[in-house]
Amino acid sequence: HTAYRRQRQMCIRDRFNTFMASLLGNLFILAAPSGAGKSSLIKALMEKYASNSDNAMEVSVSHTTRKPRPGEVDGQHYHFVSREQFEALIEQGVFFEWAEVFGNYYGTSRVTIEQTLHRGIDVFLDIDWQGARQVQKLMPDTCGIFILPPSIEVLEQRLTNRGQDSDEVIAGRMKEAVAEMSHFSEFSHVIVNDDFATALNDLEAIVISQRLRTMKQQMRYQPLLDELLGSA
């Protein structure tokens, strides 16, 4: 039974990989310890390309059981649900990946991502290393990017400057940050967010590089390639 189950899982994964490889959009994972500037980098990149329909990109809106922070809007920053609702969605197989972080669930809708990639839109997942492992296991072609702070002192200062958490919570986040950063080598790219403009340029360079891969360009320009090669 174990061998059969393993073979069945491999078949499902192979079919899924074949399906995902046919998508025009690219899937990016951005992970970082809290306070490294990941969300700010993603926001800046989205704003830079907001009016460029030829290079469309979106941030996947995750589900979470944590309470909204000041200024966060349901459906825009997260889909805020109860623990019971989230666990029901797990049972229904809705999530591409999910994880429990700081006592709260976070998950990404599989169907939403597939539909967005099918439309040729790049999708960015703002998830932790646990979620990244799940996604990369299903889709090895995913581009993983890890954001590091320039120092542990700067990271702690950024968390403190937010003014959202108590000293006890910040201490817990700092401890978790070290554990999170220990997984940086599981990602194909690493950016140190010391100077924000430089880090943003690095992120943009990675995105452009992914878009220019032969497999993606072949799908995007197949009619042109047929014309060019047929004229020989």
Image (cartoon, rainbow, N blue to C red):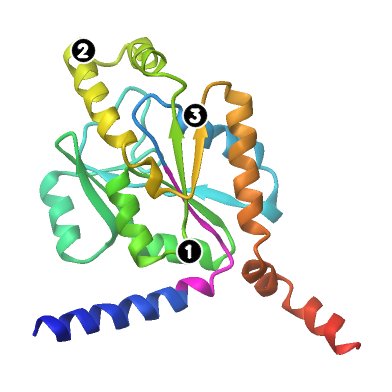
Q: Is residue 220 above or below residue 8?
A: above
User: Which of the pair 45/6 is nearer the observer?
Assistant: 6
Residue 27 on the magenta segment: yes
Q: Name the residue under label 3.
A: 40
Residue 203 on the magenta segment: no
Q: Quadrant of the C terminus?
A: bottom right
Q: In this view, does 1 lie above or below 140?
A: below
Three-letter amino acid code at the position of disc 3: Ser
Mark number displayed over residue 141? 1
Question: Residue visible at 52% across and 35% down?
Answer: 191
**Whole-percent x, y for residue 221 in the image:** 74, 72
Sequence order check: which comes first, mark 3 or mark 1?
3
Alpha carbons under labels 2 and 1: distance apart: 39 Å
Question: Residue visible at 45% across and 27% down?
Answer: 37
Q: Mark 2 points at which residue?
A: 166
- Determine contact: label 3, label 1, CB under 8 Å: no
Three-letter amino acid code at the position of disc 2: Ser
Q: What element carries label 3?
A: helix
Question: Residue visible at 23% across and 83% down?
Answer: 8
Point out the stretch of residues depicted in magenta. Answer: 20-30
State the residue lying farthest toward the right. Answer: 232
Three-letter amino acid code at the position of disc 1: Asp
